Image (cartoon, grey):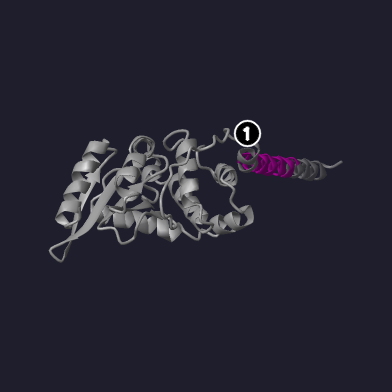
Amino acid sequence: MSKREEFREKRRRAERRNRWILIGSITLVALVVAFFLIYPQLKPLAAIQPAAPIARPNVNRNNSGDPNAPVKLTVFSDYQCPFCKNFWNETEAQVIDAYVKPGKVYFTARSAGNFVSDNATGGTDTESRDSSQAVLCAADQNKFWQMNDALFTNVLGEADGISFTPRRLQAIAQSVGLDMNAYNSCFSSSKYAAQADQDLKDAVKAGLTGTPYFVITYTASGQTKTDTIDGAQPFSVFQQKLDAALAAAGAK
């Protein structure tokens, strides 16, 4: 074999070797990508705990009570927020019993968009927005409050990346008896993504700097008035604010 032929053979071998190295590298990268895409779908979910629902009167989607009540109370909350859970767990039932059930206050629950996720992860996590969409998809099946209670019951941490993944939201939705075909169609279409974002815009416009945030609305002397409560305050604070609003609105 001549030196020229020997050189050509070495070059062919090197090209084949480089080609196999390239193929191997591409295959390895594809396997790594596939692992990170598939593994979250395979790893076990944290157990779903049954919720202890709060008895709410005259439920209509994310509202409860008499829509003609003299005072409106709107809460902007995030299902990952521990203080929001504290209000739900410690104070909400007292507000409902004392003010919503007697027809004095109309209670509305709205999300705070992706508030916690944005602040905790710089927007790389969407669990807050996803849970907000999930509960509105449940509202389409007249189970907003059942899903609301189940989400607060099953949050594991704040921006932990595991509480409200799409798979776990599915499991929570199933636990409250949703039609899963309808739920999956609603959630996968991002039907309520714009609504969740609008909730946050409205909350910030109303003065929100943290969650939960409450807006009290009433009419006094023919003018619409508002007051706010910032944070998971004790029931006595809600009594003071709501009683003042009722008095100003001329309600007993």
Provide the residue designation for mark 1: 44
Q: As drawn, which residue projects farthest toward the right? A: 1
**Nearer to the camera, 123 or 14:** 123
Q: Is residue 197 left or right of residue 70?
A: right
Give the residue at x 56% y 41%.
168
Give the residue at x 33% y 38%.
91
Q: Main secondary structure of the magenta part?
A: helix
The quarter holding residue 15 reads: top right
Q: Classify the position of the N terminus by image quarter.
A: top right
Residue 132 visible to the viewer: yes
How far across and down, in percent of the image, does residue 46 sit? 57, 33
Q: Residues within 10 Å of mark 1 (few under 14, many from 20)?
A: few
**Nearer to the camera, 90 or 136:** 90
Give the residue at x 16% y 57%.
250
Compared with residue 76, is residue 158 higher up or lower down, i.e. above or below? above
Compared with residue 120, is residue 133 higher up or lower down, i.e. above or below? below
Determine whether the residue tagged by mark 1 lies in a helix, strand or loop.
loop
Residue 124 visible to the viewer: no
Magenta stretch holds residue 34: yes
The quarter holding residue 182 reads: bottom right
How far across and down, in percent of the image, does residue 19 sit? 72, 45
Magenta stretch holds residue 109: no
How far across and down, in percent of the image, does residue 245 sit? 19, 52
Q: Which residues are magenta?
A: 17-36
Compared with residue 191, is residue 77 higher up or lower down, i.e. above or below? above
Q: Is residue 102 left or right of residue 250?
A: right
Q: Is residue 216 left or right of residue 164?
A: left
**Nearer to the camera, 195 or 11:** 195
